[in-house]
Image (cartoon, rainbow, N blue to C red):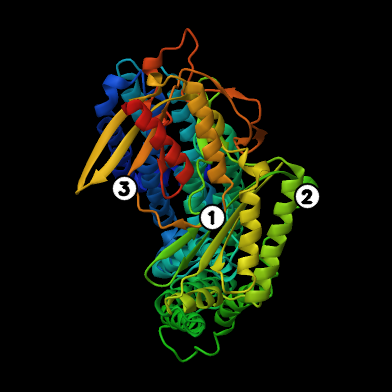
């Protein structure tokens, strides 16, 4: 006879207390791991840098942050999975299930008591990780950067949210399955389905459409996978609370959704589901669909990489789906007799693969668009072509000087790239970009993952390598967009596209934005490196030995500009003798063009090649790895006129 009374004043508290007691040994083991593993790893990583703490405090903060994630959050996620199985595993055993249902405790109290016990265990585990890190940081001599403590305790919040979301997700899957093995398989399939399908879809798009690059945010592809949302999102977002706020909100939504659904399914779950893996449930439809879809995508890409054939790509999808179908039947029904009857969700997974490929084939997803001219602030472009008869190479535009530098407007480094804000050049570049997109559509429509490779490599296999490359970066208010186009010169309008790109990149209006033009005013010397008889020799020169340094600099600038505006072919790069330029980092320069940090016009900005510290700033505290290199090399194959002028200057200094 079932008792109707309970000695506990609160059923939830009774379940809470009982669950903590029943898993006490496992919690003690995880507590030891969570306390010792991150602490030992932190001491090991930081021991070599304790004498340099004042100089590298930012790096210390970063290392503590990543150690907490790798050595703290990962064991905490494992503990969350173990707690979900140990607390709700009785649902998979008929005898245990009958016992717990006979107790005078409502299902809601069972669920809430177990969830609170898990939350308490997860919170205490995260607390042990952070306390250990705090003690280690406090014991580091000379560590005065207090931001590390904020990072530690913000990571504490993230760990609790991440592990509790994973726990509730695992509980929901446990409630919806009949056996432990079915639960583990379902958890893996559902967790991996959306991230893998999204990532492979991106690969299919990039393989099918030449000028397309697919970029996904971590939260976008892991929003349905709580076990990897937290750790991946935090690693990608860095340590800034503003960047981590979307991760925290996503985890909060996962907690609410998984907790709410898990609670509902738990209260409505039929007792007959225990140990009955053959029972039909809607969740099994989801698992079958997810597993078959994953297998289709993975199988197709596997055979594509092996065979490099479209037929292999399609056969791989069919074989993957069939294999998943077979495995699912063995797991759920332990036989193949009802394989056809249970095939609807598996066919749905295969249909998902077919729909994605149809959308890509007809350009409904993945085809890059061209921004309107009014929305483009600046453009940058680079291009080169290669002609060969199988033995010798002729290059066009392979090396066009220096188009990137790190400069300093104060103690802060700035990225400066060669780009033009000229409206006429922007319009020409946009027209060229549209011509490139039209050319690739004429060549490759309808799109599929092997067509682009087949058309390009068919010429390569015949030793007729006449390829070209055009890269265009468009800078808008929303950010920068990169378009890369590679093809054979003999295919489509390749020669025409390359000719237009070369005309833009060698125009005086474009090359005047080159970073090195104002930098040459800071030239104070160079190192000449020669190679002869298997031996390298280096010689140092200083321009202070010239009678008229300013005239030599202007001569060098004119030669450099002439090289940049030349469309003549170059021989293949064979660097034997070259010059490494050395600049005066203590003098400022005024940039004449380009774009700063991908947004601001560089024209007229005063900057330096090295940090310029304020009087109260100690330069000894600067991380040397963050100092920009100011060595630039000139080779006779790439910049022949500039190289010839440097030869004349060297001969003058040798007199």
Where residue 627 appears, as percent x and y from the top left, is 42, 28
Whole-angstrom CA distance, mark 2 to mark 3, is 44 Å
Q: Quadrant of residue 69?
A: top left
The residue that mark 3 highlights is: 576
Pick whichever, 450 or 179, lies toward us. 450
**Could you tell which of marks 3 and 1 lies nearer the N-terminus?**
1
Quadrant of the frame with the C terminus = top left
Q: Are marks 2 and 3 in contact (CB under 8 Å)?
A: no
Residue 402 shows up from this direction:
yes
Residue 373's label in the rendered image is 2
Identify which residue, 644 or 443, lies in the foreground: 644
- Disc 2 versus disc 3: nearer the observer: 3
* Residue receiving disc 1: 568
Q: Which of label 1 and label 2 is nearer to you?
A: 1
- Establish if 561 lies above or below 273: above
Q: CA distance from mark 3 to mark 1?
A: 21 Å
């Amino acid at each position: 006879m079932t008792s109707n009374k309970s000695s506990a004043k609160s059923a939830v508290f009774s379940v809470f207390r009982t669950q903590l007691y029943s898993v006490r040994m496992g919690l003690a083991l995880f507590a030891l791991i969570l306390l010792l593993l991150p602490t030992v790893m932190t001491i090991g990583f930081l021991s070599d840098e304790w004498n340099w703490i004042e100089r590298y405090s930012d790096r210390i903060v970063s290392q503590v942050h990543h150690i907490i994630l790798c050595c703290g959050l990962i064991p905490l996620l494992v503990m969350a999975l173990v707690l979900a199985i140990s607390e709700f595993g009785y649902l998979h055993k008929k005898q245990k299930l009958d016992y717990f249902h006979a107790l005078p405790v409502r299902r809601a109290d069972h669920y809430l008591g177990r969830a609170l016990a898990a939350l308490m265990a997860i919170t205490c585990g995260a607390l042990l990780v952070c306390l250990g890190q705090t003690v280690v940081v406090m014991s580091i001599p000379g560590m005065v950067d207090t931001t590390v403590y904020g990072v530690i305790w913000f990571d504490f919040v993230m760990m609790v949210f991440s592990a509790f979301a994973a726990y509730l997700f695992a509980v929901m899957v446990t409630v919806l399955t009949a056996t432990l093995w079915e639960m583990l398989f379902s958890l893996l399939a559902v967790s991996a389905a959306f991230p893998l399908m999204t990532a492979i879809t991106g690969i299919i798009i990039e393989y099918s459409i030449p000028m397309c690059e697919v970029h996904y945010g971590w939260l976008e592809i892991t929003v349905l996978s709580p076990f990897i949302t937290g750790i991946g999102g935090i690693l990608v977002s860095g340590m800034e609370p503003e960047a981590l706020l979307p991760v925290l909100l996503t985890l909060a939504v996962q907690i609410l959704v998984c907790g709410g659904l898990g609670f509902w399914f738990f209260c409505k779950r039929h007792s007959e589901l225990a140990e009955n893996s053959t029972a039909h449930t809607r969740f099994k439809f989801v698992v079958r669909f997810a597993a078959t879809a994953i297998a289709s995508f993975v199988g197709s890409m596997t055979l594509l990489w092996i065979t490099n054939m479209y037929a292999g790509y399609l056969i791989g999808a069919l074989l993957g789906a069939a294999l998943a179908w077979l495995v699912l039947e063995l797991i759920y029904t332990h036989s193949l007799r009802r394989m056809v009857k249970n095939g609807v969700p598996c066919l749905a997974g295969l249909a998902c693969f077919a729909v994605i490929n149809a959308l890509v084939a007809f350009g409904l997803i993945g085809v890059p668009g061209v921004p309107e001219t009014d929305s483009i602030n600046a453009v940058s472009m680079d291009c080169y072509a290669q002609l060969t008869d199988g033995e010798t190479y002729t290059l066009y535009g392979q090396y066009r000087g220096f188009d990137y530098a790190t400069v300093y407007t104060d103690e802060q480094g700035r990225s400066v790239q060669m780009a033009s804000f000229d409206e006429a050049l922007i319009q020409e570049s946009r027209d060229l970009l549209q011509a490139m997109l039209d050319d690739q559509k004429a060549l490759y429509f309808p799109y599929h993952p092997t067509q682009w490779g087949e058309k390009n490599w068919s010429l390569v296999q015949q030793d007729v390598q006449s390829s070209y490359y055009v890269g265009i970066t468009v800078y808008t208010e929303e950010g920068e967009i990169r378009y890369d186009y590679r093809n054979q010169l003999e295919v489509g309008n390749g020669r025409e596209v390359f000719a237009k790109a070369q005309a833009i990149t060698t125009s005086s209006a474009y090359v005047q934005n080159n970073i090195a033009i104002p930098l040459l005013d800071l030239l104070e010397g160079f190192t000449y490196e020669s190679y002869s008889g298997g031996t390298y020799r280096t010689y140092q020169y200083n321009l202070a030995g010239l009678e008229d340094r300013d005239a030599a600099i202007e001569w060098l600038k004119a030669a450099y500009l002439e090289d940049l505006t030349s469309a003549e072919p170059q021989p293949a790069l064979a660097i034997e003798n070259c010059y490494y330029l050395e600049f005066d980092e203590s003098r400022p320069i005024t940039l004449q063009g380009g774009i700063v940090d991908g947004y601001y016009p560089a024209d007229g900005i005063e900057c330096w090649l090295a940090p310029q510290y304020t009087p109260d700033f100690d330069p000894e505290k600067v991380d040397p790895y963050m100092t920009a290199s100011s060595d630039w090399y000139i080779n006779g194959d790439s910049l022949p006129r500039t190289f010839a002028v440097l030869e004349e200057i060297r001969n003058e200094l040798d007199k």
